[in-house]
Image: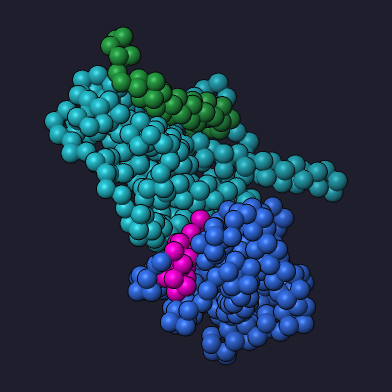
Amino acid sequence: MSRWQIARLVASKDLRIERRSRVLMNQVLPFAGVTMVMFAFALDASNVLERVAPGLVWLATLFSLLVLVQRSFAIESDDGALDALRVAGVDPVAIYWGKAFALAVQLAVLEVVLLIAAVLLYGADVPLGGIVLLATTLVTATCGLASVGTLYGGLTAGFTGRETLLPLLVLPVVAPVLIGATRAVESALGTGGVALSEGWPWIGLLSVFAVAFGAGGALAFGPLIEEAT
Amino acid sequence: MLGILALQDAGFILGGYAITFAAIGTYTWRVMSNGRKLAEQIDDSDKYWT
Amino acid sequence: MTTTPTIPAEQPAATRRAGTGTTATRVLGIAMVVTMGWLVAFGLGFSPADRDQEDAVRILYVHVPTAWVAYLAFIVTAVGSAMYLFGKKHSLGFDRFAGASAEIGVVFMALTLVSGMLWGKLTWGVYWQWDARLTTTALLFVSYIGYLAVRGLGGSHQQRAKRSAVVGLLVVLEIPLVHFSVKMWRSLHQDASVLDSEGDVSMDGLMLFSLFVGVVAFTLWYAWILLHRTRVMAMEDMLDDHGLDRALDARRAEAEEQS
């Protein structure tokens, strides 16, 4: 089987599990929604909320990312599924691509919902001219987040005492994505008077990040899951 | 020597140097005392630096 | 390089060499102490105060060198990680070397942050200012704490080595990404200021010399303590294995008794 076919199998397996268990729908999205409400309680001023809405959307995304990653690998540790794949000699790069893709799809759904929540709750405004920038930001940022999440998820999966390490490892690494995605969305929405054109350099940064960790992650995933768990 | 105290904002500057050397000294002391403790439990032939 | 110690031990305990010192480290150590003394003498004494920053510039003789040596330490960690991962023998010595270097790098990064905050309080009036260098340092500091946490996850020495090597290389990949994103971010908030956040006052003469002495002093300490820490790690690993071998020996002895 080609690497591409295996990756597709792994991705569709993960997405099928999600469709049946509905963890994203029933648990993660509500969690993200609650987070958005909590931000409003903490920040308490509607003009402030509107100004920082893009940042809050991405913060809520990052926190939910941690939950999604742990879920992505919990389904592997139960019944030793990842071990079975590994021992059977399945190409780890293909497993990585498959899981990262499934994670990206779930992340994208989450981000769209959060954006809608920001429009509803924080009074954010989505001008038509910014849609392209917005969509591009979503795609590039999601690729970067999914790459990093799948990689460190593989590292910390399995043992108790290891999962707690995930946030500490992931958050510093995705800081560039938080910075870039927030600035780009601010441009797209025109928050704080930022011009549309200022968003595109950030897309450059997000793309470099996605490519660097997509490649690095694929290479690193094999050695990381190779050990006996 | 007391001229050092005449430095502007002596507290911050001396404090900075003091913290630095204290941290370096503490880390050094811990590594070296660990080293001494462990070295007596292992034959010299097993130590790659002897 | 074998890490399994001789069992049972052949050398009487009293004759074993105490500590981890060798001629090389003694020479390094003396040079280090001397230059540290010079750093204090020049930094606090012989060098002049700056025209704008006045005596606050003296903190830079500590702040800037600790930052440089921290980066040096992390590059060494990446190199050690690569030599472990891509070397044919997967020698654990490289893993220990990388781990020790990262530990020391974290110490230096913490000192960079503390001295930077003290300098900032004197020159900017605030302890923290989200400037590019401090923010990047803070993020990398946390990243390397994560690296050290990964080293502590347990398992066999080879497992630890492989995991750490991969993470060590990934964090180095992260450095330019963090650096550029933070720099781009802070350039949005550029305020004109006499004292730019880098504190790169044009230094000359004795001031530059003091900075140079600082770099030499801290690099010497880094090299010296790196050698010692790596040796201590080797002994820790040996005793780890020793404990396992002892247990195996005991089981074997039991089995023989029963048969």
Quadrant where the image shows the N terminus of chain A: bottom right
Q: Position of residue A215 (x, y in %)?
A: 45, 73
Which residue is rendered at x = 13% and y = 30% of the image?
C205
User: Magenta span has A174?
Assistant: yes
C217 or C226, which is in the foreground? C217
Q: Is residue C13 visible?
A: yes
Q: Residue furthest top?
A: B2
* Up-down relation of residue C184 to residue C14 (above or below): below
Write the start and end of the magenta stretch as one range: A172-192
C153 or C26, which is in the foreground? C153
Q: Position of residue A41 (x, y in %)?
A: 67, 55
Q: In the rendered view, does A199 fall on the left or right side of C34?
A: right
Which residue is rendered at x = 59% and y = 87% of the image?
A8
Which residue is rendered at x = 37% and y = 71% of the image?
A195
* Up-down relation of residue A114 to residue C138 (above or below): below
Which chain is the one coloured blue? A
Which residue is rendered at x = 21% and y = 29% of the image?
C50
* Up-down relation of residue C174 to residue C97 (above or below): below
C98 or C141, which is in the foreground? C141
Q: Position of residue A85 (x, y in %)?
A: 66, 77
A113 or A70, which is in the foreground? A113
Q: Position of residue A50 (x, y in %)?
A: 54, 64
Which chain is the one coloured green? B
* Up-down relation of residue C94 to residue A104 (above or below): above
Q: Identify the main secondary structure in magenta.
A: helix
Q: Is residue A157 visible?
A: no
Q: In the rendered view, does C48 fall on the left or right side of C7?
A: left
Q: Residue furthest left?
A: C205
Q: Colour of chain C?
A: cyan
Tally of numbered tags: 0
User: Magenta span has B5?
Assistant: no
